[in-house]
Amino acid sequence: MGRLSVILLVFCMIGVPKILACRSLGSLPDAKTTRDDVPQLCRDEGILAYVDAPSSIYGHDLSDSIELALQGLIDSGCSDILSRFLCAAHFPRLDLVRYGVHNFDFYLRPCAEVCRAVWRDCRITARQLRIERTPEFDCKNFPSEKTDECLSYLYPPRDRPIIVNSTRHNATSVSILYAPPEKASMTETLRVRYNETLSWGQVGREIFQTISRSRSYSTLNITDLKSAGNYTFEVTALNNFGEGPKIFLDVPAFHNDIGTGCENITVQMCQSGIDYSQTAMPNSLGHWNQEDAGLEIHQFSTLVEVECSSYARTFLCAMSTPRCTTGPSSTLLPCRDLCVQARNGCEEFLIKYGFSWPEGLTCESLPSYDEGSDCYLGGAPVLEVWTDDQCEDIPVSWCRSALGYNQTAMPNSLGHQTVRDAELLLMTFTPVVQYGCSPHFSSFICSLFLPSCYSASVLPCRELCEEARNGCTEVLLEFGFPWPEQLACEDLPSHNDGATCYLGDFQPMQGTTNVTPAVKPRRYDTHNLGVPSLFRGWVDVQGQGAANDYCRVVANSGGYFLSCSLAGMEGAPTDLNYNSTGPWFDAGHMDTWYMMDVNEDGRDDYCRCIGCLPTTHVSCLLAGEGAFTAQTLDYDPVPGGCHYNTVNPYFGR
Ligand SMILES: *[C@@H]1O[C@H](CO)[C@@H](O)[C@H](O)[C@H]1NC(C)=O
Ligand SMILES: *[C@@H]1O[C@H](CO)[C@@H](O)[C@H](O)[C@H]1NC(C)=O
Ligand SMILES: *[C@@H]1O[C@H](CO)[C@@H](O)[C@H](O)[C@H]1NC(C)=O
Ligand SMILES: *[C@@H]1O[C@H](CO)[C@@H](O)[C@H](O)[C@H]1NC(C)=O
Ligand SMILES: *[C@@H]1O[C@H](CO)[C@@H](O)[C@H](O)[C@H]1NC(C)=O
Ligand SMILES: *[C@@H]1O[C@H](CO)[C@@H](O)[C@H](O)[C@H]1NC(C)=O
Ligand SMILES: *[C@@H]1O[C@H](CO)[C@@H](O)[C@H](O)[C@H]1NC(C)=O
Ligand SMILES: *[C@@H]1O[C@H](CO)[C@@H](O)[C@H](O)[C@H]1NC(C)=O
């Protein structure tokens, strides 16, 4: 998508809140980095100073206090927590957990009660050593424990969390019941970590729950598990000083209740390799018993043997010996999503041997998971329901009157996936349109955001853009923003050069007829839209200055690879025109991926966060001539890694 991509960025600054990266405890924002100019005493205790913490309430440095007066007290060992107390008093602790993990603006000092306890333990020694009560022990300067805004315990949690039990409600949801922690152990927050095995690899997940101050039994709910299988949860107690001991909790796999009309599967091919063992007859292919079903499906056993798709067996079995349920229909149809996966992998193989995809197994007649149907997904990725001819009415009234068409289709060249997304940004231009700076401003901006449903690959013409820019630059300035510098009309196809583009009512003057090749049209005959949960979108890998190549992660029998359906190749026998190379493609940690031109060759490269937790880093697979090269551009790992940082897939932020 080259330079055009920057347009969106500028628009974002105008109207739409920027996407915030998620943060976890392991990753302090940059501004919270620590200084190391603290006394050795504190470094030994692991207590550092945050750069932007409020300045010390004392008029002196802790080092001076120690040198002038306190060294004797520290050496005497009068109190176990003297050093920690002094350090935390001088260098307030960032409140990591007490008000929830996303709060990075509270700093806490020890409670007055802690101060008094330390002084109680040390005052006799102080008297003996003739040490004055220094300002550090002026305990009324500290907040009271009653306010809840101070540290009453200066160590990491002492005790492990007490888990009473756990309940697996269903495949996606688990509740963990835990007991209130002992007061003295000062656990503030529980952290639960678990590993999620996705089809392309394993990712670590983290959930935090601030412990209720009422100190009663509480539940922690995990609601988005991806598999029905066994899970191990690592549960750790945290407070502002760090983490305490952890425990591991095993939660068993979830098993569906089995209905009454159910029988054990007897079709041999379906007795293993699928995640259920009971079926009910008749099936949707019209077989009244498993023998008939078995005979029919046996014809396709070659598909399972050649492993043309890892979903072949699951799909064939889900058709012939459907999963048995308690519901009214007693069996579940396979989802269209599962069918499509099997067909994507195996249709080519069938055709090669002179067959075609069997009529009884058409995917289109099956229910789609995305439409909310009750169907058997069999672990297949969910496909968004998206058809080529899906036209929507144009929502913005001033666009309807400016454009010569009244229906649009997404995604657009700016990468918006829904009309709503485009509409939100478009609305920020309403004042400019109302101002009436150019009769062509609205048709330019509308045709860019809301391309015609029937020629969605057509961009507005350079001449239309220039006309709008000439008229509106000054008005935009009055509204407080310049004509987005990066919205270079020069990047758009030129009508005068003979390109196909959108002009609306504008009649440009004939310029030089220096004919350069037109921007190639997008392909809309792409069958394999890619794995919905991974990267997919319109980008520019050909370096044409237009986001007209459709790239996505696709599955094949060997795993995943990245492939683009290239602009200008409509009708070609394959829509996998531009592939990632090499034996192994790593899609990256979930939602950390984006495509952007990082090496300034005009082609968008595939970047994502990879590596093992917690030392992950961003690596970009460079787009080259005809394919992604095996070459990468890697960025130095940031402290704590990048895996927690979900980004916009077109901006990398
Ligand atoms: C978990 O413990 C609570 C309280 O003791 C009890 O009500 C609940 O039935 C238990 N759940 C399981 C699955 O044992
Ligand atoms: C799983 O159980 C939870 C808690 O009972 C419930 O909120 C959720 O809707 C259930 N999900 C499904 C898919 O049944
Ligand atoms: C997750 O996987 C990592 C690496 O394989 C392992 O060290 C860690 O203990 C696992 N966590 C849990 C909760 O199983
Ligand atoms: C967890 O779910 C239970 C019901 O399943 C609910 O009563 C409880 O409030 C939830 N806890 C939290 C912290 O959301
Ligand atoms: C879950 O654990 C049980 C017992 O530990 C084991 O028998 C079962 O095979 C496991 N299930 C899966 C899907 O790994
Ligand atoms: C069905 O299979 C289960 C487990 O393999 C077995 O225990 C049960 O006896 C079988 N039922 C019938 C009717 O064969
Ligand atoms: C859209 O435009 C066509 C002709 O341009 C017209 O026939 C149709 O009625 C319009 N539809 C709507 C909803 O305005
Ligand atoms: C990309 O990979 C697919 C699947 O392996 C293959 O069919 C296709 O021909 C490849 N495309 C190119 C341009 O090599």
Image (tube, grey):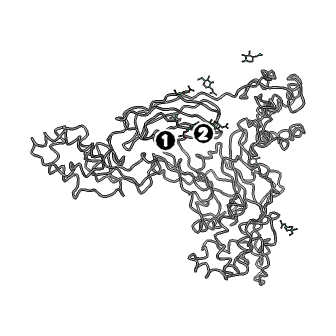
**Looking at the image, is 177 positioned above or below residue 432?**
above
Q: Is residue 305 visible?
A: no
Tag 2 secondary structure: loop
Q: Where is residue 588 shown, x and y percent of the image?
A: 59, 46
Numbered circle sitting on residue 209: 1
Residue 279's place in the image compared with 594, above or below, is above
Horizontal side, residue 628 vs residue 388: left or right: left
Residue beneath disc 2: 223
Answer with left or right where residue 382 lies relative to residue 598: right
User: In the visual, does 594 lie left or right of 121?
Assistant: right
Quadrant assignment, res 542? bottom right
Within 10 angstroms of label 1, few (less than 14), some, or many (20 or more) residues?
A: some
607 left or right, relative to 341: left
What amino acid is labelled 2 in the image? Thr
Spot occupied by residue 398 in the image (x, y as percentages of width and height)? 73, 73
**Where does the N terminus fall, quadrant-wise?**
bottom right
Q: Secondary structure at mark 1?
A: strand
Kindly tell me whether mark 2's CB lies below 8 Å from ligand 2: yes
